[in-house]
Image (tube, helix red, strand yellow):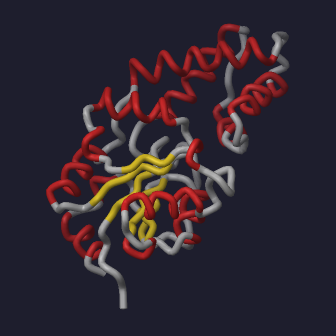
Amino acid sequence: MNSQIKAVIFDFDGLLVNTEELRLISFQRLLKKYKKKFKRQDYLLSMLSRHPLSTSAFLKEKYQLDVGLEKLHKERLEIFDELFHKKLVFKKGAFELIIKLRDKSIKCAIATGRRRYYIDDALSMLGVAKHFQVVVSPEDLIKSEGKPDPEIYLIAAEKLGVEPCECLVLEDAPHGIEAAKAAGMKAIYVPDARFVDTFHEKADLILKNMHELTDEVLGRLIHG
């Protein structure tokens, strides 16, 4: 028998907000400074790095940049931080879904690989901090380095006071879907075709954007 969904857990980057676009722009601006042009096809390769410094090292090596790694990394983060605080917006349908879940008394959480201070700033800037009961970030992890390990989602469920089987996860990345399913949760894949593959065999549902998560679809998922 299917469990009724009591909580929805959101990924952050590229799912709730447009950070993937901002990250791409930051690469373009950084390389322009060194008279190089960032190649769009390199974006997916840059996402393979789990650590931010590794991303900077990838750019330095790939584009043969004549600058120290620490300096390059500092410049990259400064560009991204400026974009983050000036150009951050919700992805299509995200805000409407948050409000819809509030009205249905469904608990909401964020489980993300981005550092907590970014999330706190973002939720405050976007005016939705009060709608999320729990935020789980890398600082909370004990046994793993994050997705695709299920730890981050299991911690979110525990902090929400619900069972994993009572959680619905929304993700835009394949490793996030892997993590959610390994945690025993339902998972909706909302990929951005510009950055990731648009199919995942383990996803319970695949959507183009969160506007497609209508009351009818959401009702079926929530009530099993």
Q: Residue 9 versus residue 62: which sits nearer the camera?
A: 9
Q: Is residue 71 left or right of residue 3?
A: right
Image quarter in which the C terminus is found: bottom left
Quarter residue 176 falls in: bottom right
Residue at the extreme bottom: 1
Q: Residue 164 versus residue 40: which sits nearer the camera?
A: 164
At a point 37% along the width and 60% down the height, the residue shown is: 160
Q: Is residue 38 left or right of residue 191?
A: right
Q: Is residue 86 left or right of residue 178?
A: left
| Image height of 79 relative to 120, above or below | above
Quarter residue 148 falls in: bottom right
Q: Is residue 23 left or right of residue 223?
A: right
Place of residue 192 in the rendered image (x, y in percent of width and height, measured from the top left): 48, 48
Image quarter in which the N terminus is found: bottom left
Residue at the extreme left: 103
Q: Residue 122 versus residue 59: which sits nearer the camera?
A: 122
Quarter residue 47 falls in: top right
At a point 48% along the width and 48% down the height, the residue shown is: 136
| Image height of 126 relative to 79, above or below | below
